[in-house]
Amino acid sequence: MTETAAVIPAYNEQAHIQDVLERVEATGLVDHTIVVDDCSTDHTAARVEATDATLLSNERNRDYGGAIKRGYERALELDVDLIFRLDADGQHDPAELRRFHRALQAPDCQYVLGNRFADPSFRETMPFDRRFGNRVVALTTSARLGHRVTDPPCGYRAMDAAMLAQTPYRSFSDDFRIGVEEILAFDALGAGFDEVPVSCIYANEESNLGYYDGLKFLYPSVTWRDRSGETSALKQFVRR
C-alpha cells in the first residue's frame, strides 16, 4: 500500500493554515501531513496543533527552502512512498492533490510539477512582475533541460520519495531557488516528469520578492552541477 506525506512550509499563516489542513485531510490521499512552522510570530503553530497534522517548529528562521528541507527529512524518516508539497497561504487548492497522485501512478513518472498557466485566465490575475519573472525562469530552466518546463517557480508539486532521497536535497538553497534546484536534481537522476494544471488565486497582496530576488531564480540553471555525474535530460515528459 502506498504511503504518502504532504510537506507544508508555513510562516505567519494563521489566517489560512487550518483551512488548508482540513482540506488536505478531506482528500483522503495523505497519510502524514507535516507542517514546518518557520518561527512564525502569530498563532500559526496553535492553529496546526488544533489539527491532526504533525507540527515541526524551527528554533530559528530557516527561510522557505530550509523549512521545506526539514519537512522532507521528516517525511523520509516516515518511509513514505510519495511526497506532496504545497504552500500554507491558501493559494493552492488541496483538492487538486488528486491530479498529482494520479500522475505519479504512471510507472515512468517520478516528479510532477503544477502548471498555473494551463488556465489562460491566470495570466490576467497574476501580477505583471511575477508573470514576467516566471517566463524568464521558465525559458532558462527549459534551455538547461532541453525541453519545455512551463512553471518552474510553482510551489505545488509531488515526487517519488525514494528518488528524493537520492538527490542532494540537504544542500539545496534555503530560499525559493530550491524549486528549480529540485527539478534539476531529479533530472540528473533520470526522473520521469509530468505537469498537471493547478489553480492559484492571488488577492491584492504585493510580492515580497524584489527584482534582485527574481534574478536569483536564474542562478540554479546557470550554476547547477550534476553531482551524480549524469547529464541526461528527464527521460519522460508525459502530457495529459
Image (spheres, rainbow, N blue to C red):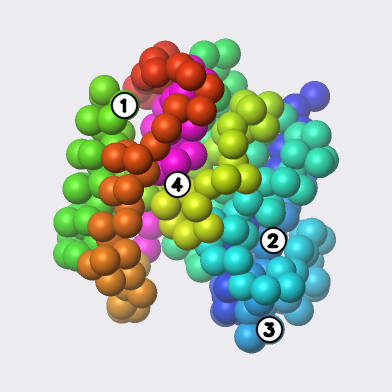
The residue indicated by pointer 3 is 43
- Say what amino acid the circle numbered 1 marks: Leu
Label number found at residue 65: none
Q: Identify whether 188 is placed above or below 80.
A: above
Magenta stretch: give its range.
180-201
- What is the x, y in percent for residue 120? 20, 47
- What is the x, y in percent for residue 88? 56, 64
- What is the x, y in percent for residue 199? 38, 51
Q: What element carries label 2?
A: strand
Q: Which marked residue is nearer to the observer: mark 3 or mark 1?
A: 1
The residue indicated by pointer 2 is 35
Say which residue appears at 64% left-offset and 39% top-offset: 83
Marked residue nearer the N-terminal end (4 or 1): 1
Residue 206 lies in quadrant:
bottom left
Q: Distance between the residues labelled 3 and 1?
A: 41 Å
Say which residue appears at 67% left-offset and 46% top-offset: 72
Mark 2 and mark 4 in contact? Answer it, CB < 8 Å. no
Closer to us: 202 or 153: 153
- Say what amino acid the circle numbered 2 marks: Val
Side of 206 where 80 appears, left or right? right
Pointer 1 local density, CA inside 10 Å: few below 14, some 14–19, many at least 20: some
The residue indicated by pointer 1 is 145
Q: Distance between the residues labelled 2 and 4?
A: 18 Å
Say which residue appears at 32% left-offset and 56% top-offset: 216
Side of 226 where 1 appears, left or right? right
Residue 176 lies in quadrant:
bottom left
Q: What element carries label 1?
A: helix
Marked residue nearer the N-terminal end (2 or 1): 2
Is residue 190 located in the magenta-colored stretch of the structure? yes
Marked residue nearer the N-terminal end (3 or 2): 2
Marked residue nearer the N-terminal end (3 or 1): 3
